Amino acid sequence: MSHRMESVSKPADEAPEKQEGRTAIEVLRASGVKSPERIVAVRVDGVLRDVSCPVGSAEDVAPVYLNSEEGLDILRHSAAHVMAMAVRSLFPGVKVTIGPAIEDGFYYDFDYERPFKEEDLPAIEERMKEIIREDLPFSRKETSAEEAIRLFGGEGEAYKVELIEDLGEERVSLYTQGDFTDLCRGPHIPSTGMIKAFKLIKVAGAYWRGDEKRAMLSRIYGTAFADPKALKEYLRRVEEARKRNHVKLGPQLGLFNTYEEIGAGLVVWHPRGMMLRYLLEDFEIKEHLKRGYEMVKGPEILKTELWQKSGHFDNYRENMYFTTVDEQSYGIKPMNCLSHMLIYRSRIRSYRELPKRYFELGCVHRHERSGVLHGLLRVREFTQDDAHIICMPDQLNDEIKGVLAFVKDVMGIFGFEYELEISTRPEKSIGSDEDWELATNALKRAMDDNGLPYEINEGDGAFYGPKIDVKLKDALGRKWQCATIQCDFTLPERFDLVYIDQDGQRKRPVMIHRVILGAIERFIGILIEHYAGAFPVWLAPVQAVVLTVTDRNTPYAEAVLSGLNAAGVRAKGDFRNEKLGFKIREAQMEKIPYMLIIGDKECEEEGVTPRLRSGENLPFMKVEDLVRRVQDETRRRG
């Protein structure tokens, strides 16, 4: 049963099954549909159904093919059922929980007497292949919830019983292949033999229903594709992603580390990582100042009463930390907006001053569950390139478009393509329906004015307003959420933000919450993987390393190093009494852009022979020419 398919009873909008006696696939075959052997499911009146469901005429049914997005999703969900069947046959006593299709694959969570290991995967794969060769049909059955509870209870499947009880439905649907029955809404592929290309990827731990107080389960991840060629390409990308993994590259390159003694989700920046942060933050500051932002800074703890006033306490406190000072409760800030509003409110503002654009590289803390912490991508302390634009309602469109232009400029510098989506009002939120409609329409209008395509992500906005989410794509085509633009009519009301208009009347401004890179930590993690640690020259913590051939070259090499540093080139020296080839290999492992070889010729002619980290050798050149080359690449952000 998948998260996506938790309602296992018949959907409310599903049309009653037609009783003419012919299945969907029979009707489609009779109509001469193209490639019926590639059809995994059908749409009947817009609802996904199994190919075996009864239908009327071919006009009532639309085929869903294996290589379509929906088809792959169904294939992967079916592969998850096959995996669960294989695990249960190999590991008696295992409890089967939830197994959804996810982006690029599937997983299933199991409760067993011991955690599963990577070494278990080959045997599970082999058993899955046997099940696939048997070409077992997937059959759907509807039954009463009581009967399903008796079935799963008799098998000792307590997790399934809990799921059925929580659904509160009178009837549920079950899917069976061979001797394995699972609770599921479906649909599924016609039979196991349709799975032609699959692979189990890894094992991880996961709490039951994501609750740290519940049982720790073993999660097995896998993937499936329409054909072996697509699977091979995917596995190639997975291997490339493994090589680029920032959790390994970060410590290897001397950028950052985490330490158990300090605590989970807390990052320690080493010298090179701190230099990378400085370069990124300095770039950010200059880009913001160019666009009329003013730099501000608020404290990291604010009285709890303020968080109650803003709505964070009621809507966000499970993600916050609190402390007590002099018997006064304080909230450690998870966001920077409150201080920015108080800065605005510190005096009366005229309409002539607007918009006000406040920018802060603000350190925030959020209580993330230990199970989701991961390297730099999910941490408990991070710095946001946070800004709040407070403007008149008639300035809102231009300001949103200005932020979108800012995002475009910055993502272009790093070579990122990106997609856009608008996230609408969540169930847990504050503010009136009217304000939410105004804010959502403002975001849509700015996107439409710029001719930007976007998707709607229903119910995923911030609790105080809708937002535009920017999902960038890295060198491997993976998507990452970074920049966001949130439109807020509610907090200006709660904090009584006003301006005096040209007629001397008090009016309410609108506030835009926005980040460009998002969390600096997360963005650096993405950059490490995007560049595979080989940062462009302008971002490289060390731009050049001076390498000596012999000890007698050291005095001149030291003078070269001193001159490079004085000229603003970030350089280091390696004057150890080691073979040159060894030192070059080390520099290449550190992904330093330039290796400057100093031998007898370089000493005599007062120059350097550069070697690039790609392995390309450049001709001998004067030190000042090398400096100009590095400075030019830095200016061009190359």
Image (cartoon, helix red, strand yellow):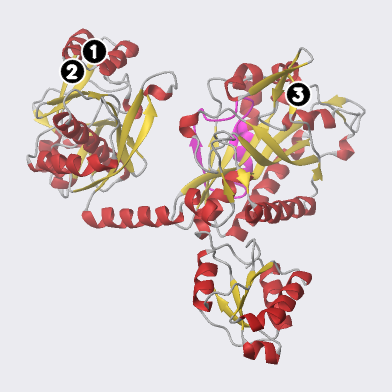
Marks 3, 2: nearer the viewer:
3
Q: Circle 2 sits in a helix, a strand or a loop, which is it? A: strand
Q: Which of 394 and 405 is in front in this view?
A: 405
Disc 1 target residue: 171
Q: Is residue 378 left or right of residue 626?
A: left
Labels in figure, total: 3
Q: Circle 3 sits in a helix, a strand or a loop, which is it? A: strand
Residue visible at 72% across and 33% down?
336
Do labels 1 and 3 touch, CB within 8 Å?
Answer: no
User: Does 558 appear in magenta?
Assistant: no
Q: Which of 339 and 63 is in front in this view?
A: 339
Q: Circle 1 sits in a helix, a strand or a loop, which is it? A: strand
Residue 424: x and y, percent?
Answer: 55, 30
In this picture, which residue range is highlighted in magenta?
440-467
First in sequence, mark 2 or 1: give its number: 2
Q: In this view, does 626 lie to the left or right of 35?
A: right
Disc 3 target residue: 302
In the rendered image, which quarter is residue 25 located in? top left
Disc 2 target residue: 142
